[in-house]
Image (cartoon, grey):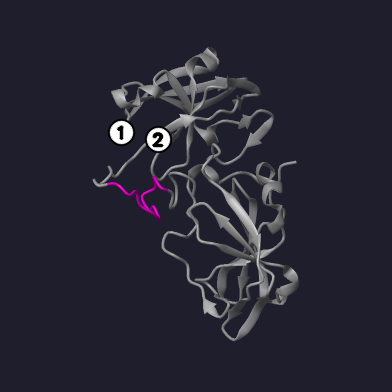
Amino acid sequence: MGLSWQQGPLAPGAIGRFLVPEPLPERLLYIEPLRRRMRVRFGGAWIADSEDVLLLFEPGRYPVAYFPEADVSPEVLERSEHTTKHPDLGHTSWYLVKAGGQRALRGAWQHVDLPPFASDLGARIAFAWRAMDAFYEEEERILGHAADSYHRIDIRQTSRHLVVRDRDRVVADSKRPLVLYESGFAPRWYVPRADIDESALTFVEHQTFCPYKGLCSYYDIGDARFAGWSYREAYPEVGRISGLISFEPDVVSVFLDGTQLHLEPGQAVIPHGPDRELSIVEATPRQ
C-alpha cells in the first residue's frame, strides 16, 4: 500500500524486487519533502504549521510527517522522561503535548541521537497521529495517516463477465463491473447493485476506514462472514465505486470470465494503527 506498506517496494512483503547485483538491506528507510503545507491542531489551537515537512517511509509502516522545531509552537511541548530506541535512528525522546487545557502524554517524539546517514531528521518533531485532534493539508483535513504520494488508485470500466456464487446460489452476475487498481493490491472488482441478488446479502454492523476511499460497510452471505463490502459514499476521488459491492474471493466463489479468482498472498487488508478507530463523524465523506 504505497511505498513502504503492504506490498510496496520498501515493505517486507514487496511484490517486486530491485534489479541490483548485491542484496539490499532488509530495512530501507526513505525520506522526501512533502511539498505541501501541513498543520496540526490540538486543544483548539494550531500547534504546528509548516511548508518544510519531511515524510519518513519505514518498512511496514505508513509515512510519518516530521516538522522543523521552528515550525512547532514551543510552549506546547514538554519533554518527558520516557525514551525509546529506534532500530535504525537511535534514541528517541518523547514529549507531553499540551494546549487549550488538553494534554497528550507521549503525543510527540524526536530522534536525538541520529546516525550521520539520517541527519536530515535532526531538530524535527513528529506527532502521534491519533493523539492529536487533526492534521490538515492547507484547509482540508487528512484522515488516517499522512498521505502517501506513491499510493495510487485507478478505476476502469470493463465488459468482462463476473459471477459470484455462494455454493449453488448465484449472488451476482455482471458484464459491466468496475475494476479498481490500488497500489500494493491485486485488482478488486465492484459490481452494480442491479446485477446482484441483494436478498442474499445481510448487512453487518461493522465498518472500517480507508484513508483513500472512505468508510466501508460489510455484508454476510449465508454463513460466509464479511463476504462483500461497499463504500456507500466513497470519497469524490473514487466516487465511481460509491454504492457498488465487491466480493472477497476467499470467502465466496468469484469467477472472472470463467476462471475462479483467489486472494493472492499479502492481499488481506491489515488493520494498522492510525487507519482504524476513527469515529463515524471523522470518517464521513469529505465535502
87 or 94: which is nearer to us? 87
User: Which amino acid does the dot numbered 1 rest on?
Assistant: Asp
Q: Is residue 275 visible?
A: yes
Mark carried by residue 88 = 1
The image quadrant that residue 196 belongs to is bottom right
Using the image, determine if residue 146 lies above or below residue 152.
above
Q: Is residue 254 left or right of residue 28?
A: right
Q: Is residue 55 depicted above or below 119 in this figure?
A: below
Q: Is residue 118 magenta?
A: no
For image coordinates 57% across by 57% down, the residue present is 181
Residue 279: percent from the left, percent from the top? 64, 44
* Residue closer to the observer: 136 or 223: 136
Quarter-wise, where is residue 99 in the image?
top right
Seen at 61% across and 70% down, the residue is: 220
* Depth check, front residue: 30 or 97: 30
Q: Position of residue 31 (x, y in %)?
A: 43, 32
| Residue to which mark 2 is pinned | 30
Residue 33 is left or right of residue 112, and the answer is: right
Crowd class of label 1 (few under 14; some 14 to 19; many from 20; radius 10 Å): few
Tag 2: residue type?
A: Tyr
- Magenta stretch: give its range: 9-20
Label 1 sits on a secondary structure element that is loop
Instruction: State which tag comes first along the sequence, 2 or 1.
Output: 2
**Residue 144 % position (x, y):** 57, 41
Picture coordinates of residue 193, whole percent (x, y)? 73, 69
Q: Are marks 2 and 1 in contact (CB under 8 Å)?
A: no
